[in-house]
Amino acid sequence: MKAFVKHGREPGQAAVQDVARPTPGPGEVLIKVAGCGICGSDLHAFNNDPGYEFVTPPVILGHEFSGVVVETGPGVAPGMVGDHVTAVAIQGCLKCPACLSGNSHLCPERQVIGLHFDGAMAGFVTCAADQLLSLPSNLDLSLAPLVEPVSVALHALRRTVIRPGDKVVVSGPGPIGLLCAGLAKLHGAKVLLLGMNRDAAVRLPAAQRLGLETAIVEGESPEELVRSTFGPGMADLFIEASGSTAALKTGFNLVHRGGTMIIVALYNGELTWFPSPAVRDELTILLSYASTRPDYAQAISLMADQAMDFSVLAQPFPLENAEEAFQEALGGQLLKPVLVV
Ligand SMILES: [Zn+2]
Ligand SMILES: [Zn+2]
């Protein structure tokens, strides 16, 4: 089968290769992959960025996937063959206190499919049957790789309560920021999505197709943009999804006293921060990482119900062109490239 393999440690040492089709072990199934999204973490692994030393080549990348079960390993009910599925990307031990409390994404033994072990940028992938979620027939397999990013956005929003009429500012129109903005709007919030000049070509127009208000912050006062969008006063909630420490710092000025910040991005550097103003404003600062199985389940039902037009996010590439898709994605111009198998 064809697979996109990170074959060496050096940045960019990854290519489409012919590899043997895997065989499902005990408790596993073999899945014929339909599509697999390229995630920011895949780009970091591709480039061997700091924090990704745990990725040990050769490894097939890919954790945001959908497919059809074609074979079951020992101990798995053969009735699963034919099921449309996706899988929880971060897999815990299912025995520790974090896992038993439903937070397997915080398990000390957590492993990510397609980073710690072979993933789904391939014709076929094996996966533990207990990590799978069934997809309903009215959810298109070509869109289902978006279930994981949708679940991440839902998890972030679940950190607080969003009420109709709340003023929400989202920084960063990548897939997670755009989904946070779109889902906050579904809650009835007034939403402003902030981007940069480089987002004007693809990302902000996609957000506008979802009916979102957008603005470019470069050369502008972000406080003034918030005022001109919402009227006097600052936002109730600021969501940082850009990964820029400068944007995070700006966010402290964009919420009113008693307001809330949710940080859902990962950063390449440290933040110098004078905490006293935020203490005096009694801000609530919430951090959000990845998602849990219930977030996946909610993402699946929202997508099956077509709660918003999720298709504006996905940009298909044939698996054979994976390298080109990675290079384009590194340019930051795409939303969610999906490798179609
Ligand atoms: Zn991901
Ligand atoms: Zn665990």
Image: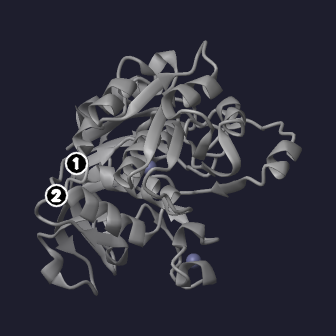
In the foreground, 270 or 276 = 276
Label total for image = 2
Q: Residue 135's spot in the image, x, y percent?
A: 21, 65
Residue identifier under label 1: 143
Q: Residue 313's spot in the image, x, y percent?
A: 30, 38
The residue depicted at 33 percent of the width and 69 percent of the height is 297
Q: Residue 2's spot in the image, x, y percent?
A: 25, 43
Q: What SS does tag 2 mark?
A: loop
The residue depicted at 51 percent of the width and 78 percent of the height is 102
Crowdedness near tag 1: few (<14), some (14–19) or many (≥20) residues, C-alpha within 10 Å: many
Q: Residue 321's spot in the image, x, y percent?
A: 27, 29
In the foreground, 5 or 133 = 133
261 horizontally vs 188: left or right: right
Crowdedness near tag 2: few (<14), some (14–19) or many (≥20) residues, C-alpha within 10 Å: some
Q: Is residue 248 above or below residue 88?
A: above
- Residue 61 visible in rendering: no
Q: Are marks 2 and 1 in contact (CB under 8 Å)?
A: yes
* Amino acid at dot 2: Leu
Q: Which mark is residue 23?
A: none
The residue depicted at 38 percent of the width and 52 percent of the height is 188
Residue identifier under label 2: 139
162 horizontally vs 3: left or right: right
Q: Is residue 327 above or below residue 159?
A: above
Q: Is residue 138 above or below residue 182?
A: below
44 horizontally vs 127: left or right: right
The residue depicted at 33 percent of the width and 66 percent of the height is 298
